[in-house]
Image (cartoon, grey):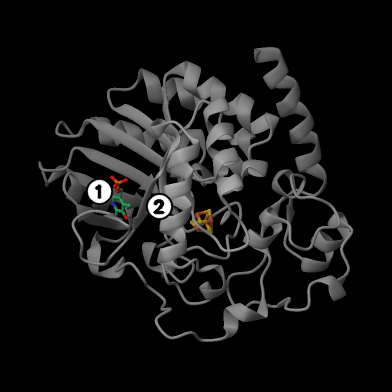
Amino acid sequence: MLSRRLEACKSERREYEQVRVFTQVDALLAFLGLERSQLPDLDDEPESFGLRVPRAFAERMRPGDPEDPLLRQVLPLAAERRPVAGYVADPVGDTAAERAPGLLVKYAGRALLMLTGLCAIHCRYCFRRHFPYQALGPNQTHLERALEEIASDPSLTEVILSGGDPLMLDDDRLDALIQGLEHIDHLKRLRLHSRLAVVSPVRLTARLAARLTAGRLASTLVIQANHPHELDESVRLALLDWRAAGVTLLNQSVLLFGVNDRVETLVELSERLFACGVLPYYLHGLDPVAGSAHFQVSDVEARRLLAELRTRLPGYLVPRLVREIPGAPAKQPLE
Ligand SMILES: *Cc1c(COP(=O)(O)O)cnc(C)c1O
Ligand code: SF4
């Protein structure tokens, strides 16, 4: 098992060194054998949130398929520029919930800490695509204040490391931060919300898993996969290693038109997650962030999908269908 994992890592690293990440639409299309004429609504120069796709993720796309569900998640479209009523820059009230720069407290006992604005991949549906990350300052300088704020509130028992993507920080930086959190007596749990786990599974180092499980705080990794094709063998082996090390693994998805809005896809996603040692947690209704309207699935359709999913899967493989309502004390069930 370990040697298989090592081989998978080695070959992935080699490829990573050639074209690590696609940032040009033309290069990605050439890699996939696609013509521009097959994608009439392309946007070549999105203003601030450009194309960004690691090679390892692009390799899981079907060559020659303009409708590929992984491609759809990352390809900038002109539709993003068209204003749609109700689609705004901060759809979930993040700025109003900020207690210190990068520290959000919306729900009882839980604080969400943004470590960085950086991500390995740019997901077009991202609800934080317009978040003013510059205000966090360079090199995680905001973290010290955030830790003081967490230490001063004994009602907090869980810290969620988020971003951007918290795994963009290297193991040493994460280690230092986790040490700081472990010194805060009222904390019991640590959660990492990361898309890198799927997009670039080499980032799931054995060292970090060992650090998490040896630490005082019970740790959970919440991955973000929307489609079963995202979970290839390299992802499965990396996740199984983390699970074997003792990290609890959950998944959250966003329900996306043209990506995962079919019962068959959602069934396959849950089954594949389980094979990777991961339980489905949330299926989020899309947050109405400006530029994402073309991904919206209606509530009626979402409920229909979930009702059907329930007839197809054991209860523990059915995610909770939720939506975030600004100001609400929890994510709201949509069913
Ligand atoms: C979603 C979210 C959480 C986590 O909510 P859970 O229901 O515990 O998964 C915590 N804090 C913030 C600010 C969030 O947006
Ligand atoms: S990885 Fe997460 S934070 Fe980054 S663009 Fe994708 S959804 Fe947004």
In the picture shown, does residue 138 fall above or below 279?
below
The x and y percentages for residue 10 are 75, 27
Q: Choose between 173 and 121: the one closer to the eye.
A: 121
Q: Which mark is residue 8?
A: none
The x and y percentages for residue 254 are 48, 55
Q: Quadrant of residue 46?
A: bottom right
The x and y percentages for residue 188 are 22, 30
Judging by the rendered image, the residue that carries numbered circle 1 is: 111
Q: Quadrant of residue 93?
A: bottom left
In the picture shown, does residue 295 fall above or below 71?
below
Whole-number angstrom distance, CA of label 1 to CA of label 2: 17 Å
Q: Quadrant of residue 121?
A: bottom right
The x and y percentages for residue 217 are 28, 27
**Badge 1, how many Cα within 10 Å: few under 14, some, many 20+?**
many
Q: Residue at x 38, y 32 (%)?
A: 220
Query: Is the CB of mark 2 within 8 Å of ligand 2?
Result: no
Asked if residue 295 lies left or right of residue 149, the reply is: right
Q: Residue at x 31, y 31 (%)?
A: 179
- Can the viewer see residue 206 in this picture? no
**Badge 2, how many Cα within 10 Å: few under 14, some, many 20+?**
some
* Secondary element type, mark 2: loop
* Quadrant of the image containing the N terminus: top right
Judging by the rendered image, the residue that carries numbered circle 2 is: 140
Q: Residue at x 57, y 60 (%)?
A: 123
Query: Is the CB of mark 1 within 8 Å of ligand 1?
Result: yes
The amino acid at mark 1 is: Ala
Q: Choose between 2 and 223: the one closer to the eye.
A: 223
The amino acid at mark 2 is: Gln
Between discs 1 and 2, the one toward the N terminus: 1
